[in-house]
Every structure is written in structure tokens, then in C-alpha cells.
Amino acid sequence: MRHFVQELDELRQQLLTMSGLVESGIYTSVQALVRRDRELAQQVLKNEARINQMEIEIDDMAVSLLALQQPMAADLRLITSAIKINNDLERMGDLAVNIVERALSLMRDPEIKPLVDIPRMASLAEDMVRKTLDAFVKKDIELARSVLVSDDAVDGLRDAIYLELIRFMQDRPEAIPQAIDLLFVARNLERIADHATNIAEDVLFLVQGVDVRHHAEVHNT
Amino acid sequence: MRHFVQELDELRQQLLTMSGLVESGIYTSVQALVRRDRELAQQVLKNEARINQMEIEIDDMAVSLLALQQPMAADLRLITSAIKINNDLERMGDLAVNIVERALSLMRDPEIKPLVDIPRMASLAEDMVRKTLDAFVKKDIELARSVLVSDDAVDGLRDAIYLELIRFMQDRPEAIPQAIDLLFVARNLERIADHATNIAEDVLFLVQGVDVRHHAEVHNT
């Protein structure tokens, strides 16, 4: 059984490594956007290839743990959670790539406005990714709950960004395509935060054994 | 072992039922949008509650199959695919709810334009959901591949809708908020198609044992 415990540790460790890559992808994608830097954009695309490779490896590791070790109860739940978290992390990586695609599209035209709230939203989203994986590894309920609270802050920033961009488009109709790119950047960050929230809910389920998915009131505690 | 075979059948059956609910949710959400019908919108919200309930049930069923039956190789892959497909279906249900939220927002103001391409995109997305689940149950590789081709058609419609909406916003800046709602409806339909594509890729992996995730060239065959 010691072997099995080590393999579970390895699985957790791999998920932590992957979340580090994802976090760095989010950060770099928004830096590429803010600094209009093609080289940073390329880094995110390279990073994404590694994330995709890791997703397949972690998936294979989880499935072979299920097959060879035939775990019971708590360990089984841990491994199926790992499969879901892996999937959420990979999708966050995709969303960072979406941001980079918008950044590259925006670089084709002159800068339309300085970006303030978008980097703020990105920084919140990165924190959520880190906290949510820490909560998973440490089985820390309070940390998982704090992620649900951050999600509300992200939604607040998104609303502010939307209103600002609508006014901007009305004032400067010629810059509507660029404003739409920024709108989708905000939407991608919101979705990254949603994935972190999914993971936090999985962690709460894993630790408490209570299914908090689809119970919106949890977000308000 | 006969018992186990029956339970696997039951799991497939449950996923088919859930995909029927999801397909109907997509259809009804776009009907609510096109007809500006609040009652249809309410139906989607009720439907979503059933989808969420089914997601939890299917998940529990899959996990207890893993725990009690300790399946090997092919069956194991089938069950872990079922967990992923379940997750994709639930997210499609969420996206139908997003569409309904945009529809309800649009109903607060007078109609801005007749909708032609959005219902067309929705109908493609519904077909993809149905085909992809049929492909899963029948292990039909050709059907799974046809879903990847449909995804390209969906992306084409999305591009047409975007260009049309940008021109619309430039002509009628006062209707920008409504045009943004429509832009997000198109984006939600695109994401529904992406989830169907994910499932089709899982089916190809399941049947062929070859991992086609993250290999964009498959989309072009």
C-alpha cells in the first residue's frame, strides 16, 4: 500500500505543477495584452503545448491508478476529482490561449485605451487558481470557500468592464472591433474564475462529502 | 458479470436521456430568443434543474461502478469517458441557460433585427449533440468524425454573425447592448458545439484507442 500512497502523492504533485503552468499562462497572456508583446504571446502558446501534454499524462496516471490499484471510497473520490480538476485546468489553459489570440488581434491596430480593470481581474483569477489547488492538496475547506468569495469579486469587475466598454463603443464606433476583443478577454477571465470555482466546489465535496454543485447560495457565504 | 453489463447499459441509457434534455434545452433557449417568449425561457430554467440532478446521479452511478465492480481496461475507459461526457453535457445545459439569460435581457427592449443565422447555428449544435451521443452508444467512428466536420460549419456561421453584428453596432450605436447580447448568444452556441466536439474526440479515443485531443489536424479531415 505504501506504493499506492506514493502514487497518489505523485498525482497531487503533477496537478500542482500543471496549475503552476496554467497560472503562469494566465499571467503571461494578460501581460502580452497589456504590453502588446508578441514574444510573450508566443510563450503562452508554447506553455499551452506543455499543459496539453500534462493533461494526457495526468489522465493516464489517474486511469491506471483506478485500474491497477482498485481503490475504495475516499481514494476513489480523490482520483475521480483529480480527473475533473485536470480537465478544468486544461480548459483554463485554453482560455489563456483565447486571451492571447485577442491580444494578437489587438496588436494589429493602434492601442485604443489603457487597461486597468482587466489586469486586476487577471490577478484575482490567478490567485483563485493557486488557492483552489492548495485547497485540494491540503484539504483546506476555508481556502476553498475563499475562492467562492473571490468569484463574486471577479463578477463585479466584469460588470464594470462591460459598462465601460459599451460606453466606449458608443463614443467611438470605429473602434468597436477592438472593444469586442476586450469584452471577450474579460469574458475569458470570468470563465477562468468559474473553472477555479468548479474545482473549489469539488474540493468541498471531497473533504466534506457534501455536494455543493448547483447550489448558488454557497457563493454568498 | 451479467449484472455489470446491465449497469453499463443503464449508464449509457442515462447519458442518452441527459443528452435529450440538453438538446431540448438548446432548442427551447433559441426558440425563447427568437419568439421573445418568457414562458419558453422558464422551461429552460426548469429543464436545467433536471439536468443538474441527472449529472449528480450519473456521476454517482459511474463512481459506484468503479468502486464496486473494479472494471478493467475497456470498461474502465468507458466509465471514465462517461464521467467526462456527463460533465460536457452539464456544461452545455449551463450554456443554454446563458442563452436564455440573454434572451430575457433582449425582451426588455424592442426587437432590433430578425434572427436568421443564430437559429441555423443552434440547429447545427443540436444535431452535433445528438450525433455525438449516438456515436458514443454505438461506438460509431464515422458518426463521431462527422461531428468534427460540423464544428467547422458552426465556426463559419459564427464568423458571419460577428461581422454582421459589428456592422450593425456601427450603424446603430444606441442598440450596442442588444447586439452584444446576440454576440454572446452566438458565442454560447459555438461553445456548445465545442463541447460536442470534445465528446466526439473522447468517442474516437474510446473506440480507436488513439488520443486525438489537441491534434487540430483531425478537424480538417
Image: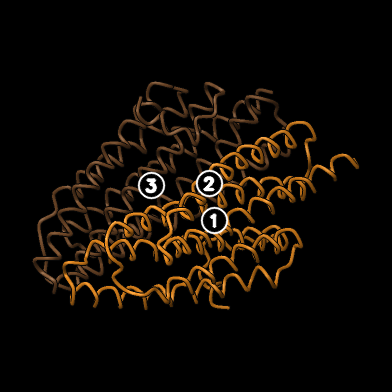
Chain colours: A orange, B brown
Q: Disc 3 versus disc 2: distance between alpha carbons?
A: 30 Å
Query: Which chain letter matches label 3?
Result: B
Q: Is residue A35 above or below residue A16?
A: below
Q: Left or right? Give the position of A138 relative to B20.
A: right
Q: Left or right? Give the position of B45 relative to B157.
A: right
Which quadrant is the C terminus of chain B positioned in? Answer: top left
Discs 2 and 1 lie in a common subunit? yes
The quadrant holding residue A172 is bottom left
The dot on residue A40 is none
Provide the secondary structure element on which disc 1 rests.
Answer: helix
Provide the secondary structure element on which disc 2 rests.
Answer: helix
Discs 3 and 2 lie in a common subunit? no
Q: Residue at x 8, y 66 (%)?
A: B171
Other-residue count near label 2 (Cα within 10 Å), few / some / many at <14 / 14–19 / ≥20 = many
Other-residue count near label 3 (Cα within 10 Å), few / some / many at <14 / 14–19 / ≥20 = many
Query: Which chain letter matches label 1?
Result: A
Q: Which residue is mark 3?
A: B22
The percent coordinates of residue A212 (x first, y second) are 59, 63
Q: Which residue is mark 2?
A: A48
**Residue B95 or B160: which is nearer the viewer?**
B160
Residues marked 2 and 1 touching at CB (< 8 Å): yes
Q: Which residue is mark 1?
A: A25
Residue type beneath disc 3 = Val
Q: Disc 2 versus disc 1: distance between alpha carbons?
A: 8 Å
> Which numbered disc, 3 or 1, marks the residue closer to the eye?
1
Which quadrant is the N terminus of chain B positioned in? Answer: top right
Q: Is residue A117 above or below residue B123?
A: below
Q: Residue at x 16, y 69 (%)?
A: A173
Q: Residue at x 31, y 49 (%)?
A: B189
Residue type beneath disc 2 = Glu
Provide the secondary structure element on which disc 3 rests.
Answer: helix
